[in-house]
Image (cartoon, rainbow, N blue to C red):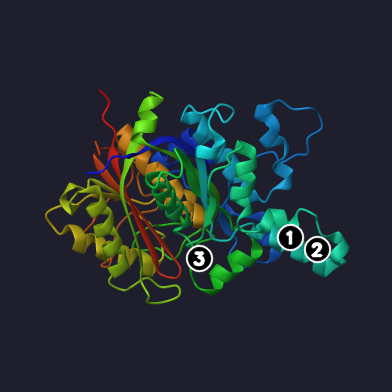
Amino acid sequence: MTDDIAVTGIGLATPGGTGTEATWDAVCAGRATARTDPVLAEAGAPVRLACRVPPQEPRKPQEPQQPQERVRGRLWRFDPATRFLLTAAREAVASAGLDPGRWDPARVALVVGTAAGGVSTLETQHRKLLASGPGALSPMTLPAFLPNMAAGHLAIELGATGPSLQTSTACASGATAIITAALLLRAGMCDIAVAGGTDAMVTPLCASAFAKLGALSRREDGPGAASRPFDRDRDGFVLGEGSGVLVLERTDHAAARTVRPLAFLAGFGATGDAHHATAPHPEGAGLRAATREALARAGRSPGEVGHINAHGTGTALNDAVEATAIRELYGPGHAPSVTSAKGVLGHTMGAAGAIEAALTVLSIARGTVPPTAGFTAPDATTAGIDIVRAAARPQQVCLALSHSLGFGGHNTVLAFTRARHG
């Protein structure tokens, strides 16, 4: 087993609420956040359901600010995806007991995953261009929407001068960022890595495009039950937004700071299906291979896995394939508990892998597995796995996996283990 990478901080900005505790409470309560979205409705989008992050008060600064207020005061400059990231990262760094004014900035790496970058800014500014011409464009258009700029803005805010990277593997982007951060730590290129994902794809273009693919739930008459991972009545996901950030450190570095890890990132795996642009491999071959790779790196066997935070989108195909992979990996003699947060938070796209990694760490640290909101009963394709339903389940988890899958055939699996404190 490897336990050289410690998770020492978590930050979340999700439809469940801004902050880790708000999100954890919503997920554990199974409190769905899907609503009819006024922006999508006004634009005439074919599906108007969405899960939005609560407002963050984007405003222009009017008075001189204290250092801790600088990010909030400049929120108006950024795409929503960057705003969510800055909020989550500030919480993660603070929860790790780190002070950006006192660390060695050259030894801090930033890795941010995103599926679409600042697509909300791009759409808004394109509409202005068509309606009023080039003079109507904001000078912040490029700095706000270019895919790398979330990491760039975060580096400026934290004063971190180590490696600053952006990853994009569709809905696996946040998990890919965490793997990349772990590799940087193991290569000795940094001592601290702030890693996660962010996306704000609740836009008319994105909603209409996903609807065209048949990926979105159309249960608009009952939005609170629209997202139904693994359920027999599932009909697609609800589009969400948000950010999740983890602070990772080598165990010896965390020990030197006398910080207590929340968990260890013990292993990880990443594979490609090479099968289809949007559909997963029908037998889940890539997911199973990524799982075996993650467990091999962790020095563990499938029989030791106690919990799986599933990708669980609520689409007919994804859930069937993921359930098949779980059944075949673990067999009838061992059934890890399985949950999906997307019943509460919707599908947060490139942020999902990082948000769900954070929830996996919290399940380990707090001995609780949240329920799968919207799940009542399986169908033939999702039967045979232990899906947590109705209420949060007390469970002492020593080894947990977080699955993330993305368009293009990306599969990532993160393996987390419990931190033992003497």
Q: CA distance from mark 1 to mark 2?
A: 6 Å
**Tags 1 and 2 in contact by the CB under 8 Å rule?**
yes
Instruction: Give x and y (percent) for residue 2.
Output: 26, 43
**Which residue is pictured at 44% across the width and 58% down the height?**
172
Q: Nearer the viewer, residue 301 or 28?
A: 301
Left or right: residue 340 versus residue 64 is left
Report the amino acid beneath label 3.
Answer: Leu
The residue identified by callout 1 is 124
Q: What percent of the width, then of the height, locates residue 408?
A: 44, 70
In depth, the one of 379 and 324 nearer the eye is 324
Q: Is residue 385 left or right of residue 46?
A: left
In the rendered view, tell whether residue 118 sits above or below residue 155. Answer: below
Q: Nearer the viewer, mark 3 or mark 2?
A: 2
Q: CA separation, marks 1 and 3?
A: 23 Å
Image location of residue 306, percent across then percent down: 22, 45
Residue 298 on image: x %, y % = 25, 48
Q: Secondary structure at mark 3?
A: loop
Any mark on residue 128, and which? Answer: 2
Would you identify the image quadrant in which residue 228 lies? bottom left
- Give the residue at x 54% y 68%: 210
> Which residue is denoted by mark 3 in the rendering?
216
Q: Kindly state the secondary structure of the residue where label 2 is placed.
A: helix
Q: CA distance from mark 3 to mark 2?
A: 28 Å
**In the drawing, does residue 237 fall left or right of residue 384?**
right
Q: Residues within 10 Å of mark 1 (few under 14, many from 20)?
A: some
Residue depicted at 75% across the width and 39% down the height: 59
Left or right: where 61 falls relative to 278 = right
- The amino acid marked with disc number 2 is Lys
